[in-house]
Amino acid sequence: MLKKLFGSPVGKKLVTGITGLGLVGFVLLHMVGNLALFSGDQAYNEYSEFLTGMGPLFYLVEAGLLAFFVFHIVTGIKIAIGKRRARPVGYDRYQSAGAPSRQTAASRSMIVTGMILLVFTVFHLISFKFGPGGPGNDDVAYLVAYDGGEPIRNMALLVRERFASPLYAFGYTAVMLLLILHLRHGVWSALQSLGAMKPSISGLVYTVGGLLGAGTGIGFLFVPMALYFNLI
Amino acid sequence: MQIKLKVWRQKGPRDTGRFEEYVVPDANPHMSFLELLDVLNEQLIMEGKDPVEFDHDCREGICGSCGVVVDGVAHGPQQRTACCQLHMRHYKDGDSIVVEPWRASAFPIIRDLVVDRSAFDRIIGAGGYVSVSTGAAPDANAIPIPKVVVDEAFDYAACIGCGACVAACPNASASLFTAAKISHLALLPQGQAERAQRVVNMVDQMEAEGFGDCSNHAECEAVCPKGISIKGIATMRREYIKATLSQ
Ligand code: HEM
Ligand code: FES
């Protein structure tokens, strides 16, 4: 039954839809969390310490996220390969017939924006989570005193250092724009994939999805831009 | 009016095929697009060449036999119009038009613009019918069904099986076609007995025929001559989830 539920043409969409929405929830929380830096370095470091300090619960969430990523990516790639197989010879001329079609640059490039997000995510984890002061990378220079307890990781310092570089600040910005593109089609699409769509709300959901995607992407840009231009 | 045509020519399933260019010097604006191809074919026959093969039957937009990609859009530029009902008055003198067959590995080309759409028949054969005895026409009228439900079922039943949805889908998915029949029968009392088995079998068959998966581009709805809504695809997914969970 599980193979039928998740392996069939309908099932693949359940997988991309469920994992896609889960990842949207994650990036939304992550974005809001990042804004803690605007409350000061100490608040940011304490927030980081709060998350890692949750212990088993934190690892559970991390494992879940990893699983969501893997299923999302594997299924996305399967769909992209299946598409080539289903139409080995393309058209000499091809264009969209226009509304009610929702075919856009965003919908056509999901696999490309997705792949770039994947490469980015790996790089992002290496430079921050597993960066100096992180797991397996102890560095006393990246520790900071914490009221009455063990010193904690100075995440704020690392973030400040990284986003001083234009390569980081603008590379990050570019990837966030691709995230917006991915979510512009993704949010609406995920609900349609789960069968949770009807014409009377589809225009609304499409707009709200677009705004949610744009809001998330733009929200991520406050920290790097503020740091790069020395505003905080 | 003069119309230039660039038409896909392919002698048979194994021929590699190529485009050929033709000029129809005196097309009439009242002609349908298929009549333009008729005129072209008369020209070709007079010149001793092979006419362009294309599918057609009713020529009034109700049978689903016709279907070619006209300038990159399945059935051409008029929405909710099969290409047999596309009229040359939408073109101007000197226009050039590219004509291609449906492209999908599940729809192999037989010759020129004619493709084999029997994959659709096999999807219907897998469950797109009602096998319980429903009586004759008067019996149908004896079963009260609310008008809104009947209307919605009819909107799905309007599918003529032309294959434009597959042709236009960037993934060559047959989701709209399959969903239309599933949604149509799921709404009616006569369809209830086989409801769960139908959706599972039809989706399985759709996969077995080698159609692609749906990425929710909604291009299918835009080219469907009957304007069938992708709401049906959402319904198919709900039906499928319910059916597999209850199996
Ligand atoms: C920040 C991480 C990501 C988020 C929030 C996200 C979100 C989403 C959402 C909501 C959808 C719509 C699901 C659906 O249509 O059913 C989607 C689709 C898709 N995602 Fe992602 N995604 C992320 C990362 C990735 C990555 C790393 C890949 C790598 C390949 C990827 C590839 C795809 C593809 C190919 C689709 C389209 C599937 C289809 O054709 O139906 N995504 N994504
Ligand atoms: S020929 Fe019958 S629908 Fe076009």
Image (cartoon, rainbow, N blue to C red):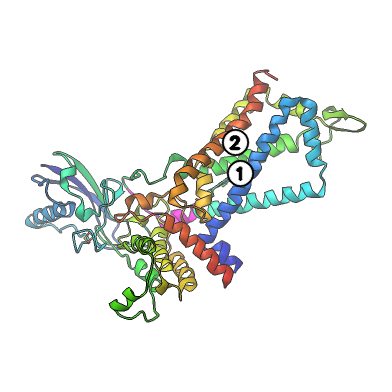
Q: Is residue B23 magenta?
A: no
Q: Is residue B11 left or right of residue A81?
A: left
The chain letter for the residue carrying disc 1 is A
Along the polypeptide, which appears first: circle 1 or circle 2?
1
Q: Position of residue A81 (x, y in %)?
A: 49, 54
A142 shown above or below A207: above
| The one of A31 and A118 positioned closer to us in this rendering | A31
A198 or B34, which lies in front? Answer: A198
Q: Amino acid at mark 1?
A: Val
Label 1 near ligand 1 (CB < 8 Å): yes
Residue B134 image position (x, y, % from top left): 36, 79
Task: List x then y, in percent, for residue B172.
Answer: 40, 55
Screen quadrant of the N terminus of chain B: top left
Residue reaching furthest to the top: A230
Going 38% across and 60% down the picture, which residue do you hit?
Answer: B148
Task: State which quarter of the image contains the C terminus of chain B.
Answer: bottom right
Q: Secondary structure beneath disc 2? A: helix
Local secondary structure at mark 1 = helix
**Which quadrant would residue B187 be assigned to in this image?**
bottom left
Q: Classify 10 Å Cα crowding around label 1: few (below 14), some (14-19), many (20 and above).
A: some
> Which labelled disc corresponds to residue A24?
1
Q: Are marks 1 and 2 in contact (CB under 8 Å)?
A: yes
Where does the magenta region start and end?
A80-91
The residue that mark 2 highlights is: A216
Task: Count neighbours of disc 2 (C-alpha within 10 A) and say few if under 14, some if 14 to 19, many if 20 or more.
Answer: many
Per the model, the C-alpha gap separating discs 1 and 2 is 9 Å
Question: Mark 1 vs mark 2: same chain?
Answer: yes
Q: Residue furthest right?
A: A148
In the rendered image, residue B153, in percent from the top left (x then y), is placed at: 37, 63
Answer yes or no: is residue A226 visible. yes
Chain holding disc 2: A
